[in-house]
Amino acid sequence: MPITDHPRAAVLFDVDGTLVDSSYLHTLAWWQSFRQAGLDMPMASIHRSVGMGGDKLLDHLLPDRDRDGDDALTASQAAVFATYWPALRRTDGARELLVQCHDVGLAVALASSAHGRDLEMLRAAIDADAYLHAATSSADAEESKPQPDILVAALEAVGVAAADAVYVGDSVWDIKAAAKLGIPTVAVTCGGTSEAELRDAGAAEVYENPRALLANLAGSAIGKLAARSR
């Protein structure tokens, strides 16, 4: 089915860990940022917090910190993560999944809270801009995940109601954000969170990666949404 100018339904995608294999790169970048600040934070704790915005991640990991150091921590993390840009790779099947969602008539939006240059690099790794209706960045949301602001911005960008959307993400924070809007989340484990954790958080379905979701697209929540919106 060729895509229309005004799709009646949308699939929103998280980017880091979902479409780009970057969750552990973010973990390393935060770990190095903490070490540079003299903070010894276990990588496992950091990884379980990746998926939140940086402000929420710091609140989660360092609730009693001196907040005067927040800007230095986030700037340090961003600088370290930038050194990993050449290593960014899309997850298996990511581009093909976006193409197929586009081709079945759904609006396709990246619901990312990445900062400008990071988002450019992530989009370059995915290499599917021709199939996107919209892409958000940190500038589009007042609050980061697990608050739903970035999803609201993506829905507004494509002109679709939350009741006519599905979200694809890899973290429990993605699922919590989508749940606040009543949007079902199709989760993938390629970001490093287990199927059990994703299901406990409320994921409607769980797949290993975008390739596995693509192979089951017709019977998935995305396929059912596309059929319903025709």
Image: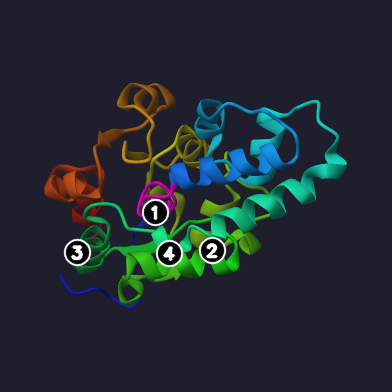
| Marks 1, 4: nearer the viewer | 4
Q: Which image quadrant: the C terminus?
A: bottom left
Image-based side of 190 in relation to 47, left or right: left
Q: Which mark is residue 118?
A: 2
The amino acid type found where label 4 is placed reads Pro
Label 4 vs label 3, nearer the camera: 4
Report the front residue among 229 and 167.
Answer: 167
Q: CA distance from mark 3 to mark 1?
A: 16 Å
Instruction: Using a 10 Å C-alpha cutoff, classify the residue at mark 2 as few (fewer than 14 neighbours), some (14 to 19) or many (20 or more).
Output: some
Of badges 2 and 3, nearer the viewer stands 2
* Upstream in sequence: badge 2 or badge 4: 4
Q: 47 left or right of 31?
A: left
The tag earlier along the polypeptide, 2 or 3, is 3
Q: Answer whether residue 30 is visible to the viewer in this image.
A: yes
Q: Disc 3 designates what residue?
A: 104
Residue 142 falls in which quadrant of the image? bottom right
Give the x, y percent position of residue 82: 55, 61
Examine the structure image and report whether residue 65 is included in the region drawn in magenta.
Answer: no
Predominant SS of the magenta segment = loop
Give the residue type at disc 2: Asp
Provide the residue designation for mark 1: 13
Give percent across and percent down for residue 42. 58, 26
- Among numbered discs 3 and 1, the one appearing first in the sequence: 1
Q: Quadrant of residue 94?
A: bottom left
User: Pointers 4 and 3 in contact (CB under 8 A)?
Assistant: no
